[in-house]
Image (spheres, rainbow, N blue to C red):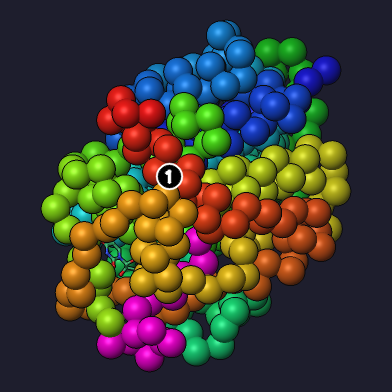
Amino acid sequence: MKKRVLVSGGAGYIGSHVTVELIQAGYDVVVADNLSNCDLTCFEGVKKITGKDDIPFEKIDCCDYDAVDRLFSEFRIDAVIHFAAFKAVGESVAEPLKYYRNNLVSFLNILDASKNHGGCNVLFSSSATVYGETDVLPVTEQSPRQPATSPYGNTKQISEDILRDTVKATAAYGAEVMAGMDRQGPVKGIALRYFNPIGAHPSALIGELPRGVPNNLVPYITQTAIGKRECLSIFGNDYPTPDGTCQRDYIDIVDLAKAHVAAVARMVEGKMKKDYEIFNVGTGRPVSVLELVNAFEKVNGVKLNYKFAPRRAGDVTAIWADPTLAEKELGWKAVRTVEETLASAWAWEKHLAGKA
Ligand code: UDP
């Protein structure tokens, strides 16, 4: 029997790419999304790419425990991947309560339902933001977490801790689930710490769909190139880096999605070495903002209007992953080049503009 994965936030940017890879790897899925930050564009794209018209979609808000509980009663769920969360750093500073309430309550509900329905495997989408500013690069999973610089980052740290504590507390729970009589069972967890996911599916049928002015670099680049924005501001060219602009570890969205499939397989096939594990999901390759802009221009044959602007508050100088542990334990490694990924991002922007 196929294993089923609940993908909360599965209609969004990362969630839709992960749903495609799960289905193509032979999993059944159920997508849950409240569509608060996206529409059904990507979900429709997922159906087209996979050729599956009957993917279960539940329009629920994970902050509603009864709705989450009903989902666990309706489907036999072998693993949950929890994406459903707000993600705008600046907005989280302005509206902390909105972020804490949404991001934490939804995750508490997922964990509670997982525990109450005989136990479950839970994959949490964490972030490299938990490492903060550090001089010791690349960062490994053992690198110390720094105090979060935004409520958004704090929700990632707190959620990791909640998962760790829940796994510990439920380890000894009985796991039998009898007809009509769910028993509390153990929760096992993996936190994936993403670096900077960029790009789109090679089909150009799904990709990032920012609402309003994009906060992230690559959507800002593609929208500038297509003429939706006038000029890209490069935030800071006086950082202590080789070319003065910040360095990040940009990871292709499909590579990132495949890391989730590897992590789910590890959980459902009982291959975890500990009941709670953490993996970096990055390439190990630092790329500066300027290098990324130059690579985008070169691979796509377009000229980008950009200027240097003051530093953006809260940005760290440089961060990139040591991805060794994921390669060793998950058998996963990023394979797409930055150029391939930037070409996919451009193809998606052109698709959106009806120019593809
Ligand atoms: N960045 C930029 N201009 C923009 C958006 C981002 O120069 O319009 C820079 C930002 O300062 C950072 C890098 O691009 O150095 C990546 O930013 P992003 O917001 O995409 O991801 P973050 O690393 O902040 O999570």
Q: Is residue 340 left or right of residue 9?
A: right
Residue shown at the point (21%, 60%) measured from the top left: 305
The quarter of the image holding the C terminus is top left
Q: Residue 136 appears at what percent x and percent y?
A: 56, 88
- Above/below status of 158 relative to 39: below
Name the residue located 32 percent from the left edge and 28 percent from the top edge: 355
180, above or below 133, in the image: above
Q: Amino acid at mark 1?
A: Ala
The picture places residue 44, in percent across and down from the top left corner, at: 45, 18
Q: Quadrant of the N terminus?
A: top right
Labels in figure, total: 1
Q: On the rendered structure, is 30 left or right of 347?
A: right
- 24 and 153: which is toward the camera: 24
Please state if 54 lies on the left or on the right of 153 as rendered.
Answer: right
Q: Residue at x 46, y 54 (%)?
A: 299
The quarter of the rendering in which ligand 1 is drawn is bottom left
Q: Which element carries disc 1, helix, strand or loop? A: helix
Ligand 1 within 8 Å, label 1 CB:
no
Q: Main secondary structure of the magenta part?
A: loop
Q: Position of residue 149 (x, y in %)?
A: 33, 72
Identity of the residue furthest to the front in this view? 301
Taking the view exactly as shown, the residue that stands out farthest to the left is: 230
Q: Residues within 10 Å of mark 1 (few under 14, many from 20)?
A: many
Query: Picture coordinates of residue 123 (x, y %)?
Result: 62, 45
Residue 336, above or below 270: below
Q: Is residue 109 visible?
A: no
Q: Residue at x 68, y 67 (%)?
A: 323
Q: Which residue is mark 1?
A: 345
Query: Which residues are drawn in magenta?
Result: 238-250
